[in-house]
């Protein structure tokens, strides 16, 4: 694997620069495996490609506090990035005929092993997470291009600032006012798990452990990346003013956030990164099999229903909750 | 006639119009589709260029157009149930286009060549 360095690494940048850098690497450099670490300038909330940002983020509040809001081209949920959250990129070959999830699993496992070398009990978990003692320390999102696979992973060196989390999912305040444990209870940081080295030393370790060579980009390369970066600020891509009324969200204590998006009458799409595809399909089927589904808030579920830890009562709460 | 791009999009040609979707191989590789980002009717698409995106529980991928032309219909059923792509990707096309340059079809793979490419 080759480590990519910028000609002037001391210059922090807005996060879309690094998203653009991934694309530039995938489109420009010879086939191979590449790795780099982001150096961000301001706290940022990064949303998934198809998320409804106003439903996920308190946009005016975040902007007032100088928090940047960006959208990536990969899927998945919103994450926060501040100085304590290392953002890592992997760009590798995508071999036709090989399961795409296998490429991303291999990357997650490689990263977990690199952390294990530091004495941490880090294990790849689920589809794209790394956990220590059952609590998440890293998550990943993936973007497949022709012949190339891009993975970006978060790595919590230390816990994110609570002020930053407040801007994520406006409904969070509602959950916390009910005494429900928030996302902080489900995640941990490398520092909290006893890692005693600095962030710079951690980056050096990842560089040494994962990469056999370093490639320093030229000013011309950086200029080309900056041109791609502009597309990330296009309002038609960011879609900060999207209608959020068709989406509802609740927190499943100890598990994660469950969201429902409403399409045509009788159709609902659920999402929650703690659920696998089969569980989501089973939950959607349970909802859609309710007679006269479509008049939200006036439906009943089998009270014994429990799918992957989500109960009938929680599902009912989701369907009845305020958008 | 059905033709393919190496990036797994197909076009089913009917006269001067074509239905564009993703192949069963691509649908299987992506896994459960959660969202299909489609252009709007009246938008122009260009051969070999991105016209939308598809997100699954595994990854997000861009969608590339096999031909140039105008979008005359989008499959709105996918907005409500994107998993239709998994259920039958050949039946559940993504966009319907009017083909502006039929000669572009010559550059695409036929079914046999595409099948060979994914073996």
Image (cartoon, rainbow, N blue to C red):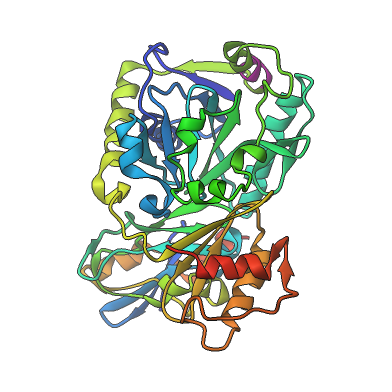
Which residue lies at the image location 36% right of the left edge and 32% below the top edge?
A: A67
Q: In which quarter of the image is residue A284?
A: bottom right
- Residue A247 lies in quadrant: bottom left
For the N terminus of chain B, the image quarter is bottom left
Residue A315 at x, y = what percent? 61, 68
Is residue B12 or residue A23 the one in the foreground?
Answer: A23
Q: Which residue lies furthest to the bottom in this view?
A: A291
Q: Where is residue A122 in the image (x, y as percent from the top left)?
A: 75, 31
Query: Left or right of A71: which side holds A112?
Result: right
- Tell me the residue at 46%/42% (across/down): A168
- Residue A100 placement (x, y as % from top left): 61, 51
Determine whether B72 is above or below A228 in the image. below
Residue A196 shows in the view = yes
Q: Which residue is drawn at 49% across and 52% down?
A: B60
Closer to us: A286 or B81: A286
- In this rendering, position of residue B40 left or right of residue A189: left
Left or right position of A280 against A229: right
In the rendered view, would you say B29 is above or below A71? below
Q: Main secondary structure of the magenta part?
A: helix
Q: What stretch is highlighted in magenta?
A: A205-209
For the C terminus of chain B, which image quadrant?
bottom right
- Using residue A8 as the reference point, say whether residue A103 is left or right of it: right
* Residue A170 % position (x, y): 43, 48
Query: Magenta segment: does it hold B12?
Result: no
Instruction: Tell me: residue B77, above or below residue A261.
Output: below
- On whether residue A208 falls in the magenta region, the answer is yes
Q: Nearer the viewer, residue A107 or B76?
A: B76
């Amino acid at each position: 694997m080759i480590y990519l360095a910028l000609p002037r690494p001391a210059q922090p940048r807005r996060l879309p620069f690094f998203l653009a850098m991934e694309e530039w690497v995938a489109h420009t450099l010879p086939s191979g495996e590449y790795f780099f670490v982001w150096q961000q300038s301001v706290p940022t909330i990064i949303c998934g490609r198809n998320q409804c940002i106003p439903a996920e983020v308190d946009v005016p509040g975040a902007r007032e506090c100088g928090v940047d809001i960006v959208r990536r081209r990969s899927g998945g949920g919103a994450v926060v990035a501040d100085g304590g959250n290392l953002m890592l990129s992997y760009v590798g070959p995508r071999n036709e005929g090989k399961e795409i999830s296998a490429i991303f699993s291999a990357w997650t496992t490689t990263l977990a092993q690199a952390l294990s070398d530091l004495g941490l009990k880090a294990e790849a978990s689920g589809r794209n997470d790394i956990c220590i003692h059952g609590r998440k320390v890293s998550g990943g999102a993936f973007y497949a291009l022709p012949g190339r696979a891009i993975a970006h992973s978060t790595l919590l060196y230390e816990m994110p600032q609570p002020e930053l989390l407040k801007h994520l999912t406006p409904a969070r305040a509602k959950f916390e006012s009910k005494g429900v444990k928030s996302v902080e209870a489900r995640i941990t940081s490398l520092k909290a798990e006893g890692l005693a080295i600095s962030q710079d030393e951690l980056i050096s370790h990842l560089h040494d452990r994962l990469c056999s060579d370093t490639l320093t980009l030229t000013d011309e390369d950086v200029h080309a990346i900056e041109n791609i970066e502009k597309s990330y600020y296009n309002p038609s891509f960011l879609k900060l003013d999207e209608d959020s009324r068709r989406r509802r969200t609740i927190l499943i204590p100890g598990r994660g956030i469950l969201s429902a998006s409403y399409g045509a009458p009788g159709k609902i799409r659920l999402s929650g990164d703690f659920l696998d595809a089969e569980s989501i399909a089973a939950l959607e089927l349970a909802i859609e099999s309710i007679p006269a589904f479509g008049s939200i808030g006036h439906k009943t579920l089998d009270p014994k229903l429990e799918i992957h830890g989500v109960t009938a009562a929680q599902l009912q709460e989701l369907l009845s909750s305020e958008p | 006639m059905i033709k393919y791009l190496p990036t797994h999009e197909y076009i089913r040609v009917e006269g001067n119009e074509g239905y564009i979707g993703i192949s069963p191989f691509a649908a299987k590789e992506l896994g459960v589709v959660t969202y299909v980002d489609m252009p709007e009717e009246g938008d122009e698409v260009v051969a070999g260029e991105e016209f939308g995106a598809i997100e699954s529980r595994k990854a997000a991928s861009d969608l590339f157009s096999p031909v140039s032309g105008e979008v005359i219909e989008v499959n709105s059923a996918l907005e409500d149930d994107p998993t239709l792509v998994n259920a039958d990707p050949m039946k559940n096309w993504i966009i319907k286009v009017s083909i502006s340059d039929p000669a572009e079809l010559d550059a695409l793979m036929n079914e046999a060549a595409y099948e060979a490419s994914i073996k």
